[in-house]
Amino acid sequence: MIERTGRVLWGSNNIYSVIDTASNEICSCRIKGKQLKVNDEYNILVPGDRVLISIASSEESGEGMIIERLKRENVLTRWNTKESSPQAFAANIDCAFCVASPLSPPFRPRFIDRCLVAAESGDVTMHIVLNKIDQGILSDDRERLDVYKTLGYRVLEVSAQEGDGMASLRSELQGKFVVFMGQSGAGKSSLIRALDPQAKVTIGEISEKYNRGRHTTVLSRTYVIPGLSTVVDTPGVREFEPAGIDPQALAFMFPEIRERAAACSLYNCMHDHEPGCAVRDAALASEIHHDRYESYLRMLEVLKLQGRKHR
Ligand SMILES: Nc1nc2c(ncn2[C@@H]2O[C@H](COP(=O)(O)OP(=O)(O)OP(=O)(O)O)[C@@H](O)[C@H]2O)c(=O)[nH]1
Ligand SMILES: [Mg+2]
Ligand SMILES: [Zn+2]
């Protein structure tokens, strides 16, 4: 038996595709018995997880055993509504890209806000990719994108179809292990195809009736793009809820609310309705964009509810 370290690319039914750190070879591995002691987690291993594997030294089987999951540097988690519990979906990420589109599916800044909060809480750097710029962009959405830029988030405007902006996306990806996430139909898989025409990736259509994607990608798959980067393509979702965040800490996941929350002198303030709250005052004075504050308020309610459901 030889022990080595590797990185999980994807997995299902206890068969994981793991890339060997030393050789860069991809092998399939199983979790050995009950050795992997990570309790109370919906997903024990997610794309990006670093693992200790042992591979039989004989030539016959290329299959390895996963013995241990190594400590995560960061993790992206969402709330699994069906299970009423937090669900990790990627770990040890250099950065994540929240992929959105301007018209079909429509631009939804609240959705982006929730992704950004999940990233902040999991210690992941997140950039915003507005794909399909060939469809044009409405002025309200332009304003909202500018707010993200002012807050320090990187916004890339691209078209997987026409190729606009793809060079800057490429340079952002260079040498990294990244995740594409976002609404179904925004074009996550299309971007991967545009970056690597050889990638065996399935692309779906936009439902005309509902103007949204058809959930074409159903399982996270990871694409090693030669000479560029490793990209986890995640299934698009209709709704995204961050998970595992103490409602009291939520204010610190919004860069523009953070400082005001720290300066708020009210005891145990949730920064939502309390008179004299520094955050609320800043929102009333439009120093915080009203729609971002609205995002904060809505997420606060959702997190309070999660806390009651998750035991
Ligand atoms: N006009 C335009 N359409 C695009 C562009 N990129 C992707 N599309 C279309 O958008 C649709 C959805 O693309 P996908 O790549 O399957 O979207 P996805 O985000 O992977 O969706 P899920 O797998 O369901 O999460 C397809 O019909 C693509 O052809 C673009 O840059 N411009
Ligand atoms: Mg897809
Ligand atoms: Zn306050």
Image (cartoon, grey):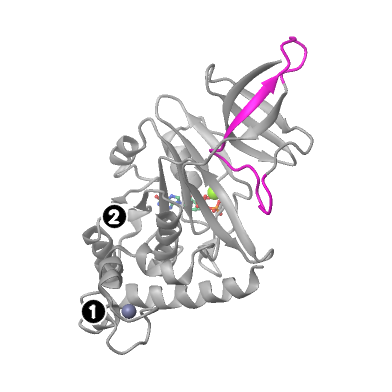
Residue furthest top as drawn: 59
Quick check: marks 2 and 1 in contact, CB under 8 Å?
A: no
Residue 3 locus on image (x, y percent): 64, 19
Mark yes or no: residue 18 visible.
yes
Picture quarter with the C terminus: bottom right
The residue singled out by tag 1 in the image is 282
On the picture, is 203 further left or further right than 186? right
Queried whether the magenta region covers residue 77, the answer comes back as: no
Residue 255 locus on image (x, y percent): 29, 62
Queried whether the magenta region covers residue 57, the answer comes back as: yes
Region of the chain picked out in magenta, as a range: 38-62
On the picture, is 105 further left or further right than 6? left
Compare residues 307 and 254 and report the one nearer the observer: 307
Picture quarter with the N terminus: top right
The answer to whether residue 276 is above or below residue 81 is below
Residue 153 numbered mark, or none: 2
Compare residues 203 and 247 and report the one nearer the observer: 247
Seen at 76% across and 17% down, the residue is 61
Amino acid on which disc 2 is placed:
Tyr
Residue furthest front as drawn: 267
Compare residues 258 and 107 and report the one nearer the observer: 258
On the picture, is 283 further left or further right than 237? left
Seen at 45% across and 32% down, the residue is 196
Q: Splitting the image into 4 quarters, where does residue 47 fall?
A: top right
Amino acid on which disc 1 is placed:
Ala
